[in-house]
Amino acid sequence: MRYFKIFLLFLIPVALIFILDTGIAGLPPLGKLMDPVRGFMANAETEQAFSDVEVPVIKPNVGGSVYFDERLVPHIFAEDDQSLYFMQGYVTAKYRLWQMDIQSRAAGGRLSEIFGDRFVAYDLEQRRMGMVYAAERNVELWKADSALFGCLTSYADGVNAYIDEILNDGYEELPIEFKLLNYKPEPWTVLNSALLLQYMSSTLTGYDDDMEYSNLRKLLSKEDFELLFPDRPAGIDPIIPKEKTYDFAAVSNDTLQQAIRGGYFRKVLEIFETEHGRNQVGSNNWAIDSSKSKSGKPILANDPHLQLNLPSLWFEIQLQTPNSNCYGVSLPGAPAIVIGYNEHIAWGVTNAGIDVRDWYTVEFQDDTETNYKFGKKWLPTEKRVETIVVRDGDPVIDTVLYTQFGPIVYNDEMINREPDATPFKKQRVHLAMRWAALEPGEPIKTFYLLNRATDFNDYRHAISYFNCPAQNFVFAAQDGDIAITQQGRLPLKKQDQGRFILDGSNPDDYYTGFIPYDHNPYILNPERGFVSSANQHGTDETYPYYYTGFDFEFYRNRIINRSLEKTQDATIETMQQLQQNNFNLHANEALPVMFGHLSEPCKKGTGNSACEVYTALQEWKFMNDPDIEAPTYFQVWWDTLYQMLWDEMRDSVIAYVQPNIYNTVNAMQVWPVDYALYDVKATTDQKETLDDIIELSFLAMVQIVDSLRKEDKSLLTWYKHKNTQIMHLSQIPAFSKTGVHTGGYRNIVNATSERNGPSWRMIVELTEPVQAVGVYPGGQSGNPGSKYYDNFIDSWATGKYYILHMYSNEEEAAKDAKFSIRFN
Amino acid sequence: MKYLGSIITGFALCMAGQTFLPWWWIFAPLTFLISFIVNYQSAWRAFFAGMLIVFITWMVAYIFKDLANDSIMSGKMANLFNFKNGYTLFFIVAIAMGIIGGLTSTAAYFTRNNK
């Protein structure tokens, strides 16, 4: 009995320790994690983290210094490119290692290795889209360019030097997310960098409406379809102004009458539409020339609107060698600066939003799927086996077939994963994806060259290497030039080609050419004294090539252009005000139409909440400011109306897309009030008119407002209703910021919506020396236990900027430095 | 006095162990060792000594680091594990670890007094 007692007294603590050391039931090893010395408290950053250190470097000929300023921005001073990118890799890993790891896994479809089988569908999707295939092909292309590849390998070496350092120290030094998710970083490779760039490409071009449009063409008349989904609606203000003439001989692109293919296409995997959401990513950029600025020097501004996450998408940095000096933001995981400026020029980007993803139906010769029909020939498929490793589970193996168009992303097997829907016969549909993001390209070369560019010609040469995602590169130089180019390797399409599902067996549907680089639209020093872009159409109808967009924008660009037309004697502050502009042009144009169909509620007596809301909207100046209620009323009303209006285009099985808000407002003005599409499908006994649905949606809005007011009046203020959230990449709420106090919205220059917004605001004045300000909603450190994790958010939310210090030499940087790292 | 002395010595030993050795569970063999050497008068005294030593060690280590970090990390971890604040988290973990330490300390008592 005594021995048994002793045995128990040993067994219980030993068993507890074992469980807490290894982790059970999906929990991390809690003992290790809670260890006050090496567990999560090791990630509780203290001032000790900011003492000067020396890092011995094993790699020969690598050395230099990094000085961190008071905001933890590294200023890197190196003798050559090899050392420069080694140190960039090292310091980026030091602050953003987990982010780099998880983002490259997300890109390459490897999340199941960490999170288990709930990510298998996501991983499958990434693999089927050819993300890894494309990244591998990119690496092969980069290898041929030894200077470029040298930069990428130096960067990887720097990252690995840091990884080795922390792995030597064991568990203690791991970023907190590795501890919580219980895994370790793996060595960084150039492929990881390629995957990250692939991810960016996917974020910015991974959309199309081909299936949806194909279905809509069967639902709607041709006239309605073209009114609701036009390639180029009336009233737009393209990036390249009217004064530009396209005086080149366009490469032939004859007109093709696109046949409407038979059969509805079933809704594709949910993740396709919900992951990023259209009308979410977007950006503004502009530059004014000397005639419009107070200093007589150009000013350039850029704010890319991307998903707001912690750690931030961007990492601020200065990179200096004897041949170059550049400041801006970099992507953790890739060398060089993506948006920034040097001593001579500044540049920025917005997404072109051109549709570069198309789908081809593939007809196989037989069930072996080894050959597919193309005209009179049978072409062979290539098989690529993708293995998805699943944590605590069996690996999933998927064979992806590649055609000349690209990978077959959806086929019978894939579609069958969806729950069966009765009205639709299962049909064997094999859809191959043609996507510009899968073509090899050298975006890093563009950034490498832009970092070192000194004038317009350098800029044009640098961006010529940029294939995908097509971007609007804005440019300003100290010598007074301003310019904008819509750059990308864009397919040479016939009219309507790629708007709908294409027939892979028909050689007429297969496009092979590309628009010559010189024919991409650009303008240098326009008469109006400014260039700008905000994801709108690139050109007017005089541009001789056909293109279509997946998500052109219609409001921000007009506000920016109207404002810049009037701008005189501008300073950095003037540009800040424009970036913060909360004017809701959509509401300004839609509300009068809506009021025109509404019976005035105050006639029935004042004092009721319908009248109150109505009056508030009447008096509203269309500013989406954070602390007022009118934007909430408008948005709720609009959203309700929109859903009532386009209920025909919402289906649980068939893939549809609803018209954008610009075309919606337009249709409301064009159609008679009793037009058939206004009818609400759910009420079979009634036929609603536009008047009816505007009335109904108004009353529904008042009801929502009333119930919110009862719950808590402050919920009606715009910022609370909108609830801007900056989420940790793993979606852990404790590491995220919600309810950020900001105004703006989608389609407003200050494009801060629920989850997306200005991910970096930068303004550069090309004086001597160059002056610049910038801010992003996050912090330099990726460590949730650091005060530098989210310390920029309040400044960002209140519209403040930081002065950016591009030091001209090491001594200056050393003087201001909080601490330094010396590599030797 | 001897009891208090053993706890202070135990605390110093455990703190050194936690700081310099790579195992979070190092307190368990240490409390066993202390209890075995000291040979407490009763099983309960052994248990409480072990528990107190570990509890104090973990609390002191937590608080020391937490003060220098303005509770940034502990606040977020507490939130993640649904605790009110970092100190509640510290307390509960330190108690749990204390129980393990108490058990090994008691095990030492019975090993020594196995008659």
Image (tube, coloured by chain):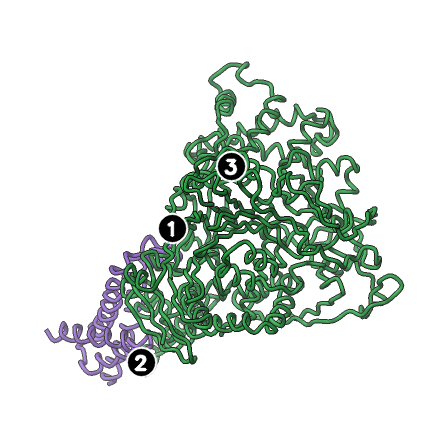
Residue A305 % position (x, y): 52, 48
Above or below, comparing residue A428 to residue A643 in the picture: below
Question: Which label sits on residue A6?
Answer: 2
Residue at (58% x, 50% y) in the render = A472
Q: Does residue B16 appear in this view?
A: yes
Judging from the image, mark 1 belongs to the subunit labelled A
Instruction: Report the residue at 70% width, 61% height from top.
Output: A409
Q: Which of marks 2 and 3 is nearer the N terminus?
A: 2
Give the labeled residue for mark 1.
A792
Pointers 2 and 1 within a single chain: yes
Do dots 2 and 3 share one subunit? yes
Which sits earlier in the primary sequence, circle 3 or circle 1? Answer: 3
Q: Work out whether A422 lies above or below A429.
A: above
Label 3 vs label 1, nearer the camera: 3
- Taking the image as shown, residue A236 lies to the left or right of residue A111, namely right
Amino acid on which the number 1 mark rests in the picture: Phe
- Label 3 crowd bin: few (<14), some (14–19), many (20+), radius 10 Å: many
Q: Mark 2 lies on which chain?
A: A
Quadrant location of the N terminus of chain A in the rendered image: bottom left
Q: Chain A is drawn in which colour?
A: green
Camera-side residue: A609 or A804? A804
Q: Are marks 3 and 1 on the same chain?
A: yes
Q: Chain B is drawn in which colour?
A: purple
On the image, numbered disc 3 is attached to which residue? A564
